[in-house]
Amino acid sequence: MGENIALTRPEQLKLYEPRFNQFNEPQEPKTPNAWFVQHYPEAYEKCGSPFLELVEPVDQFSVQVLPISINLDFFAFVLGGRKEFGHHVIYYESEMAWYFRDSDGIFKSTSAEKMANHYRALLLKCCQDMPANVHKLNLFHEWRGDKTVKAVVQKAKSILAADSSFFSATSTNQRIKGQELQERVARRFVESLLTAEPGKVLLLADAYAVFLRLAKQHNLEPVKRSDFKAMVVPIVQEQFGVRLRNDLRIDERSGVRGWKNVKMVSG
């Protein structure tokens, strides 16, 4: 059917076109295209019309509207949420995982299945809001089927992709669990509790003990000493310009690890 229409009646195939009333205000949505663009204008700006619709005249006063093809990119973008309402969903590529920003501003994990359910619910809501002259079969059945749903969610992985910097230790984005949480505490530890002072020595063991107490205060899981070292050493070098040494001599002990010319402010 679609090929025949394209060849013989291309003027009846419609993409979304903004329409305004005499007060230059958006009209109530009467087609699936208008409904989705009104709810997700940014998706339309980025990805174009949600559907290709067949608009056929019934008489001189009315038409029938049949959405015949779906824009997967549009709906993949829609799954990212409405940022003006604080909604934000990302696909964290390094972990192949989905995250959404909750009402407290913290990102929490979600699943591909929940993304699929959200997409299905949006199509159903649009279907219910449409007037009688809109054919609803594709909205209710065809495009809510597994084939299209999987295609939309798969497409969303690239459109909503976020790289490792999204949850880095210096990022403003926060989640409940992740290695960057310990890294943020490590950075706070170095910047707030350490200071440069000639002649002083900060032992790695002492720094590690204080860090464990800080991690516990923030309800974080304890980290191994080797992981603490990997996090803190580059921060100390960046902050104070000194390297971790393995040849310090303290109280008749040699080969002690620590930093020269750095001391603990408190802890």
Image: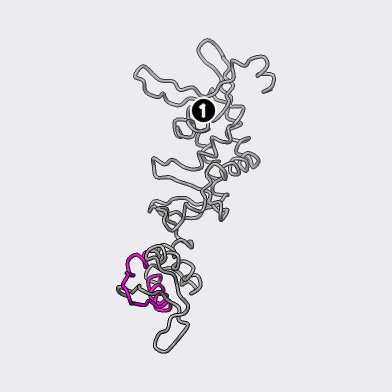
Q: Which sits in the foreground, 117 or 253?
A: 253
The residue positioned farthest toward the top in the image shown: 60
Q: To which residue does mark 1 refer?
A: 33
Left or right: 6 in relation to 260: right
Q: Is residue 70 above or below residue 215?
A: above
Q: Position of residue 73 (x, y in %)?
A: 56, 36
Q: How many dots with numbers?
A: 1
Q: Position of residue 177 (x, y in %)?
A: 47, 61
Give residue 65's position: percent from left, percent from top. Answer: 56, 22
Q: How is the image coloured?
A: one colour
Towards the viewer: 15 or 209: 209
The segment highlighted magenta reads 188-215
Assign the magenta stretch its main secondary structure: helix
Q: Is residue 216 magenta?
A: no
**Where does residue 101 sit, x and y in percent of width and height?**
44, 50
Q: Quarter of the image holding residue 239? A: bottom left
Q: Quadrant of residue 133?
A: top right
Element marked by disc 1: helix
The front one of 208 and 100 is 208
Decide: is 189 above or below 105: below
Q: Is 211 rendered above or below residue 92?
A: below
